[in-house]
Image (cartoon, rainbow, N blue to C red):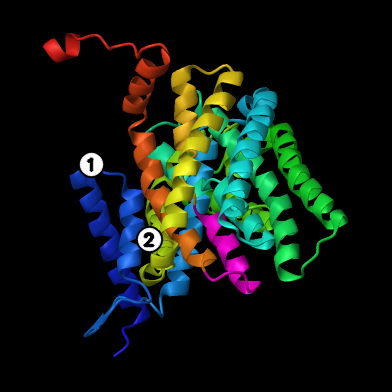
């Protein structure tokens, strides 16, 4: 007997809540637990009486609420910064982003070439390996309270840089995979639109900051919240229509509103929505992964994960050091941007639509799952990792905190 929509949503929320309690008890990042919980249930789960763990009726709604979670995560991350800070770091972000993409994209091309895969499959895998997950990175930064650290500015910049790359790359690969050809004009147009939208939105938003400040002088919290959320969803939705990731649109809105005097009020209102819908995103992401299809892709995925961790770390350290960050800050950059997610799955679905090798979908799913687990762990343990590397490479040792607290 099929369960009702509301009952299914309640069941999903119960699983998400239990996952949160388990993560808190284990002192473990919640992201991988939510993804694994989604995998355990989902389309291939059993039906036990009225308990339908497949979430067939509620699947689209859970997915939509997950999309809102990405928007709130990136919006909140943008609020922690300001347009001014990012503009000042523009040159460093461009250089660092170029270093990051060249190194990781080269590794992404090399692996499938070594495996002897065809050209179109090589291009898809290169994209899967090259792009970080904005949603997971944002969640980890918030959960670990890393948004106040100086190097997070570079991490944000790298995410913006990657989105420009995504806009160009997706237009190229979709043309090659789906039609076998692509137009140079369409590629240049996609790149110009994506870059122009981001830069234009930031500059116009900064110019209008005093007026936005005045417009947001709304006494009612209810109306204030409706105005903020309307602005957020409209900009994110418009971003999607011009092939800029909706998450980046949300990030831009956060950066603009961070310039206003209403920052504390906005943060106070958005935090509960960020946590609630953000958890649903990772759970819905797990629902999309079929654990029964992962077996044949184990070795390619594990190899790609190892190469990605190494490539991200090296690129992050180089990018961080050239921007003037300490070795500790550069290490944090390299470890934080390791997670892969939504863009990798998009490319895998594109490969399926284009009739490419069947292994690409399970490869992408397992690759994303492993890095969704390892990425937050590497970020959480970055202090310990740095201390070990400092001994090997002779980097400055971490300054020990005064022992007064321990002796008190």
**Circle 1 SS class:** loop
Q: Residue at x 28, y 71 (%)?
A: 11
Labels in figure, total: 2
Q: Please give the range of residues in magenta.
A: 341-358
Q: Residue furthest left?
A: 408
Of residue 320 and residue 239, the one placed in the foreground of this image is 320
Write down the residue under mark 1: 27
Q: Is residue 2 left or right of residue 212?
A: left
The alpha-carbon separation of the residues under discs 2 and 1 comes to 19 Å
Residue 239 in view here: yes
Was residue 354 drawn as part of the magenta stretch in this picture? yes
Was residue 184 drawn as part of the magenta stretch in this picture? no
The percent coordinates of residue 116 (x first, y second) are 60, 58
Write down the residue under mark 2: 283
The N terminus is located in which quarter?
Answer: bottom left
Q: Quadrant of residue 260?
A: top right
């Amino acid at each position: 007997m099929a369960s009702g929509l509301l009952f299914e949503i309640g069941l999903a929320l119960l699983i998400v809540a239990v996952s949160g309690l388990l993560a808190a008890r284990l002192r473990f990042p919640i992201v991988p637990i939510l993804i694994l919980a989604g995998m355990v249930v989902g389309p291939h789960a059993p039906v036990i009486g009225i308990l339908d763990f497949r979430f067939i009726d509620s699947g689209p709604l859970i997915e939509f609420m997950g999309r809102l979670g990405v928007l709130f995560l990136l919006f909140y991350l943008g609020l922690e910064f300001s347009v001014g800070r990012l503009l000042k770091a523009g040159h460093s972000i461009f250089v660092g982003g170029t270093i990051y993409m060249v190194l990781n994209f080269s590794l992404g091309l090399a692996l499938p070439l070594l495996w002897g895969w065809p050209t179109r499959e090589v291009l898809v895998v290169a994209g899967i390996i090259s792009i970080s997950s904005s949603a997971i990175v944002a969640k980890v930064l918030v959960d670990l309270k890393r948004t106040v650290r100086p190097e997070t500015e570079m991490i944000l910049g790298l995410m913006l840089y990657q989105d420009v790359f995504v806009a160009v790359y997706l237009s190229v690969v979709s043309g090659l995979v789906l039609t076998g050809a692509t137009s140079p004009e369409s590629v240049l147009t996609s790149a110009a639109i994506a870059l122009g939208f981001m830069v234009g939105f930031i500059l116009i938003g900064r110019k209008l900051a005093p007026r936005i400040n005045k417009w947001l002088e709304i006494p009612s919290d209810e109306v204030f919240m409706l105005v903020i959320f309307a602005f957020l969803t409209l900009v994110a939705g418009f971003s999607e229509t011009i092939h800029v990731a909706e998450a980046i649109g949300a990030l831009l809105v956060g950066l603009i509103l961070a310039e206003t005097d209403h920052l504390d009020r906005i943060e106070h209102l958005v935090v509960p929505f960020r946590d609630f819908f953000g958890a649903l995103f990772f759970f819905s992401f797990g629902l999309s992964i079929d654990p029964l299809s992962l077996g044949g892709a184990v070795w390619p995925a594990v190899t790609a994960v190892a190469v990605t961790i190494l490539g991200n770390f090296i690129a992050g350290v180089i990018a961080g050091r050239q921007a003037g960050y300490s070795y500790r800050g550069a290490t944090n950059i390299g470890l934080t941007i390791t997670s892969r997610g939504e863009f990798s799955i998009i490319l895998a679905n594109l490969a399926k639509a284009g009739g490419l090798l069947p292994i690409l979908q399970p490869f992408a799913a397992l690759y994303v799952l492993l890095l969704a687990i390892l990425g937050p762990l590497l970020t959480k343990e970055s202090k310990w990792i740095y201390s070990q590397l400092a001994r090997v490479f002779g980097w400055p040792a971490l300054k020990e905190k005064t022992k007064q607290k321990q002796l008190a």
